[in-house]
Amino acid sequence: QVQLVESGGGLVQTGDSLRLSCAASGRTFRSYAMAWFRQASGKEREFVAAISWSGGSTLYADSVKGRFTIARDNAKKTVYLQMNSLKPEDTAVYYCGAGFGVSVSLYEYRYWGQGTQVTVSS
């Protein structure tokens, strides 16, 4: 089993950067693909980015491609989401998930954190 705790969210202005972190507990962290999803108020949770267990494969939503970067440090049991050139439409609660394969579907991720709020003002 894996427990996930996100951090790093906050209130920023358009064009600013933030780095989210997701710290995992459990001995099997390196076995899992990890992903970031986000959920804006009144909307469904949507895929943002994912990374394979080794870090060798990544996947991004078109809306964040070129602006966001996902990375992981298996020794620290942490996955990161570097977010640059933030826009108001990036405002959402950001969740990290752990699953067995890189996927854009939230149903493929077995474990979830509690989320961290990102608010981008115009």
Image (cartoon, helix red, strand yellow):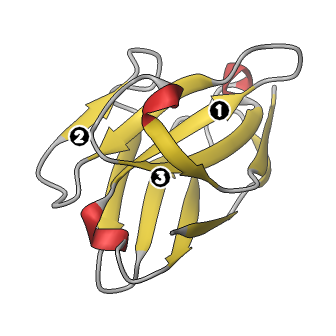
Is there CB contact under 8 Å for labels 3 and 1? Answer: no
Q: Nearer the viewer, residue 41 or 111?
A: 111
Q: Mark 3 or 2 closer to N-term?
A: 2
Horizontally, residue 42 falls left or right of residue 51, namely: right
Q: Amino acid at mark 3?
A: Leu
Q: Which residue is mark 1?
A: 38
What residue is rendered at 45% in x and 60% in y? 80
What residue is rendered at 53% in x and 35% in y? 85
Q: Secondary structure at mark 1?
A: strand
Q: Nearer the viewer, residue 109 or 35?
A: 109
What residue is rendered at 38% in x and 83% in y? 27
Horizontally, residue 77 falls left or right of residue 8, namely: left
Is there CB contact under 8 Å for labels 1 and 2? Answer: no
Horizontally, residue 96 falls left or right of residue 38, namely: left
Q: Which residue is mark 3?
A: 81
Q: Which residue is mark 2?
A: 58
Q: Can residue 115 be seen in this snapshot?
A: yes
Callout 2: few (<14), some (14-19), or many (20+) C-alpha neighbours within 10 Å?
some
Callout 1: few (<14), some (14-19), or many (20+) C-alpha neighbours within 10 Å?
many
Mark 3, mark 2: which one is toward the viewer? 2
Residue 59 point in image, percent of width and height? 27, 32
Residue 24 point in image, percent of width and height? 52, 73
